[in-house]
Image: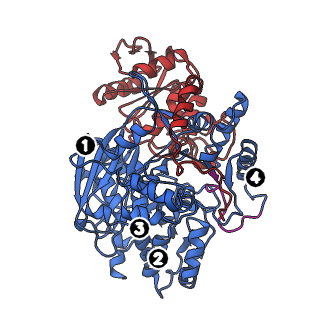
Chain colours: A blue, B red
Amino acid sequence: MSTLLDKIWRSHLVRSQAGQPDLLYADRHLVHEVTSPQAFAGLRAAGRQVRRTDLTYAVVDHIVPTDNRAEPLADAVADAQLKALRANCAEFGVALLDTTDPRQGVIHVCMPELGLILPGQTVFCGDSHTATHGAFGALAFGVGTSEVEHLLATQTLPQDRPRTMAVRVGGALGPGVSAKDLILAIIGRLGVAGGTGHVIEYLGKAVTALSMEGRMTMCNMSVECGAKAGMVAPDETTISWLRGRPYAPQGGDFERAAAWWRTLPSDPGSRYDREVSLDATAIGPQVTWGTNPGQVAEITGAAPDPAGLAGEQERASALRALDYMALKPGVPFRDVAVDCVFIGSCTNGRLEDLRAAAAVVGARKVSPGVRALVVPGSGQVKAQAEAEGLDRVFKEAGFEWRLPGCSMCLAMNPDVLEAGERCASTSNRNFEDRQGRGGRTHLVSPASAAAAAVTGRLSDPRQLI
Amino acid sequence: MQKFTVLTGLAAPLDRANVDTDQLIPKQFLKRVEREGFGQYLFYNWRFKPDGSPDLGFVLNQPRYQGATILLAGENFGSGSSREHAPWALLDYGFRVVVAPSFADIFRNNASKIGLLLVEMDGQLMREWLQRAQANEGYRITVDLARQEMLGSDGFACVFKIDPFHKRRLLEGLDDIGLTLERQAEIKAYEESHQEPWQAVAHGLTPRE
């Protein structure tokens, strides 16, 4: 009996020797501007080439401004990094989705939508949210720059085999409750380091009921509980989503590939190193109150009292977090006013996310004094949203409608929170200073972010739909 | 990669759990295209106030910890992003060893590629080391990788575990890419036996007809 992970691991073993890490072949290596320049410099210094330019794809996403892309960029250091990626891709023969390419976008949004990510593959990238691609039944995880260089030079990665964890989610998510709420609840349950050393496989009715977008949202944040990767076995939802995508196999090749994909799900009765079960029916919209994604609660609740938490470290961490977030223990979330709303990112910048947010906005207006941004995850998402008129819903409500990029998720571009500003954000990390020094981040779903924008407070979107 | 054998150095206690990579090296410093020079930005938002002056309350700014080469920390150290800039910054600042009850996976991998030794220490023993480094000014620790041993300047000592292959890589300063390139024939053999039509995208990302 084999799990999905076993099957992918076995089929990618270049070499396995006791006492050493296994050597895995990389089917896809995704590259962006922030974690690659030193890797290309390393190749150049050693006189090495990129081994498989046909399996290596680059895009610029982290530093691009989302309002004005005129060059040189106002930030000279960012401008140099953008030009370094261009020069490196040209020198080494790597395909690049540049700022002017209509397919450009956040790497974990635009690469899958092109059909580049397929079930059963190994996918690596110098970015922790590479876990996103596990949604396709691929083994996908983030690596550092030394590993990027290793991948460029050898198309392989030495890796110790991770442990396995099954997270089974029964029941069904209620209206207004999304994959984002589900993964936040899972992280809350496991804790911010609960998945360390493990690859999580998500199973159960509530998981298979998710769209590919929902699965990407869920797998994306697997790393926020410390997991190496998250995965969902490929099924008919996966196969029909991939059919006809530009770089997915075509015609008879597609059918042959799909027949193989259908053999990938874990065999019934497979064993995992750890198993956790949840009931989706019991999960409501979630909001983080602290400074790591495990510090999360139902949006109908209140900021916790650290005194009531178990464990000295937990209490110390919660005290520090509430102080940073300027939240008094016991304050109901619905009484917490926001200054900013960010809808976008590799977690929640897809069409389904924008539809969910727009449905909450409807004919309402952004609350006075709230700065609200919608940053589509890719050029294609932006074009599709505009074709459906979602951009008009947002713009008429008072949202800014931006160009694709990572934007305020990590604020490496000009989209930054001011000190003390509070933001309801559909991104993935609420670390101190993440969205701007002294900025306060509450992670929520797109529907909840839209609800916060129109009410000016953290809000339960179920009351607005 | 830089070798690691034995080091005796000043220990600095950073008694916090979940020290994340956004704290280790804030994003505004990730735009640089060099590998060196990140030490000045390590823990930037904790070391420096918004006006740029040093925050003297932060442990690494205290005179007694200047020149520390061993960082003692809380659980889940290095959580968050894949930025190798985080271990680069630690190394460039002067740290050669981080001791903590647990480390995040990607951070652990990254540190292992550049010769920054991570010692995983049982929570009870970790408290001992943290308390000793706080209580005794000038507290020094000798970290001996070959013997897998830590010895404090007050005689407190313990052994630690480390993966044998990783230990050898550190002791000998082995370069991963060099090791893998010795396996060219095996990589080629793998490629030749895995040529499903859906694997390769031979035409790069030029738009398809």
Q: Which residue is mark 3?
A: A445
Q: Earlier in the sequence, mark 2 or mark 4?
A: 4
State yes or no: discs 2 and 3 in contact (Cβ < 8 Å). no
Q: Residues within 10 Å of mark 1 (few under 14, many from 20)?
A: few
Q: Amino acid at mark 4?
A: Ala
Kindly give the residue lying farthest to the front in the view shown: A252
Q: From the viewer's perspective, is residue B113 above or below residue B156? A: below
Name the spot of residue B85 as percent of width and height, x first: 58, 39
Q: CA distance from mark 1 to mark 3?
A: 28 Å
Pick whichever of labels 4 and 1 is earlier in the sequence.
4
Q: Secondary structure at mark 3?
A: loop
Check residue A274 in the rendering and tell me which mark sits there, or answer none. Answer: 1
Q: Earlier in the sequence, mark 2 or mark 3?
A: 2
- Please identify the quadrant where the C terminus of chain B is shown: bottom right
- A339 sits to left or right of A86: left
Q: Are marks 1 and 3 in contact (CB under 8 Å)?
A: no
Between circles 2 and 3, the one closer to the viewer is 2
Magenta span includes A384? no
Q: Are marks 1 and 3 on the same chain?
A: yes
Q: Earlier in the sequence, mark 1 or mark 2?
A: 1
Q: Which residue is mark 4?
A: A76
Label 4: state its secondary structure: helix
Residue situated in front as seen by the camera: A311 or B160: B160
Distance (Cα) linking label 2 and label 3: 12 Å
Residue bounds of the magenta highlight: A58-70
Amino acid type indicated by mark 3: Ser
- Residue at image location 49% in from the left, 59% down from the top: A252
Say which element carries label 2.
helix
The x, y position of residue A46, in whole percent, is 70, 28
